[in-house]
Amino acid sequence: MPLILSILMTCVVSAVATLRNIGLVEGVTGHWLQAWGLSWLIAFPTLLLVLPLVRRIVGLLVQAPAR
């Protein structure tokens, strides 16, 4: 799950940031792919590191279903 989530999230966020910064110009795909690659290299390990903390926080906020 973290792999797919990080791919999808960084894809969307880097596309929005790239289009906002340089617009829909020639070569935008190359710029976007560079931005996506760098953001994914940072996001995936970060996601793996913070996932246990996020699970604990969610566990405190949400009641477990009854069995």
Image (cartoon, rainbow, N blue to C red):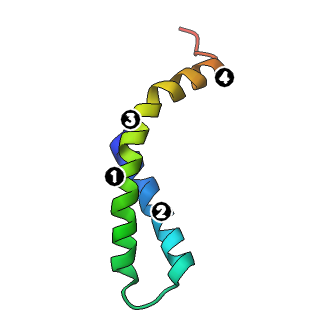
- Pointer 2 residue: 12
Query: What residue type is disc 2 on?
Result: Val
Where does residue 22 sit, x and y in percent of width and height? Answer: 51, 82
Q: CA distance from mark 4 to mark 1?
A: 30 Å
Circle 4: element type: helix
Q: CA distance from mark 3 to mark 2?
A: 19 Å
Q: Residue at x 66, y 22 (%)?
A: 61
Query: What residue type is disc 4 on?
Result: Leu
- Pointer 4 residue: 61
Query: What residue type is disc 3 on?
Result: Leu
Where does residue 39 sit, x and y in percent of width and height? Answer: 40, 57
Identify which residue, 61 or 45, lies in the foreground.
45
Where does residue 8 sit, x and y in percent of width and height? Answer: 41, 55
Q: Is residue 24 above or below residue 40?
A: below
Q: Quadrant of residue 1?
A: top left
Q: Which mark sits nearer the N-terminus, 3 or 1? A: 1
- Pointer 3 residue: 48
Q: CA distance from mark 1 to mark 2?
A: 15 Å
Where does residue 7 sit, x and y in percent of width and height? Answer: 37, 53
